[in-house]
Image: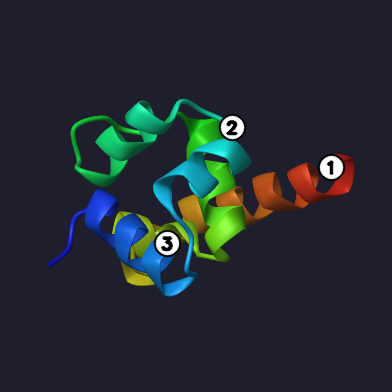
Amino acid sequence: MLGLGEKIRAEREDFGLTQSDMAKAIPMNQSNYSKIERDMQEPSIEQFKRICEILKLDANYLLDIEEGDIPKKDRELLKAVKAIIKKYK
């Protein structure tokens, strides 16, 4: 199973982007972005969100979360939070 950084790297390469391209788009320092791909540093929530947006990825895929792993009440809460975020975006 691939780690978070390995998944991000593979998807970035599929998009034909360099680490520098990603770092500029996030925005963040390229050396720190490199650490994310090498699983030496976790992205902040905002950085994680931008990575998902740039690479058009579902956060659940990157985090290895399957719908069955999350209790029903928590899934409902997540849906409500997503709706609020979308409304005020």
- Which one is in front, 43 or 83? 43
Q: Position of residue 62 (x, y in %)?
A: 36, 58
Residue position for label 2: 27
Q: CA distance from mark 1 to mark 2?
A: 19 Å
Apparent side of residue 88 relative to residue 84 in the rendered image (left or right)? right
Residue lying farthest left? 1
The answer to which quarter of the image holds residue 63 is bottom left
The answer to which quarter of the image holds residue 32 is top left
Question: For the residue labelled by badge 1, is the local secondary structure a helix, a strand or a loop?
Answer: loop
Residue at 47% in and 68% down: 16
Q: Nearer the viewer, mark 3 or mark 1?
A: 3
- Reading the chain from its start, which is encountered first: label 3 or label 1? 3
As drawn, the label of residue 12 is 3
Q: Nearer the viewer, mark 1 or mark 2?
A: 2
Kindly indicate whether the residue at mark 2 contacts the one at mark 3 (C-beta within 8 angstroms): no
- Reading the chain from its start, which is encountered first: label 3 or label 2? 3
For label 3, the crowd category at 10 Å Cα-Cα, with few meaning under 14, some 14 to 19 and many 20 or more, is some
Residue position for label 1: 89
Q: CA distance from mark 3 to mark 1?
A: 25 Å
Q: Position of residue 14 (x, y in %)?
A: 41, 74
Q: Position of residue 48 (x, y in %)?
A: 48, 42
In the picture, which quadrant includes the C terminus?
A: top right
Q: Amino acid at mark 1?
A: Lys
- Which one is in front, 24 or 61? 24
Apparent side of residue 81 relative to residue 45 in the rendered image (left or right)? right
Q: Amino acid at mark 2?
A: Pro
Question: For the residue labelled by badge 3, is the local secondary structure a helix, a strand or a loop?
Answer: helix
Apparent side of residue 7 relative to residue 3 in the rendered image (left or right)? right
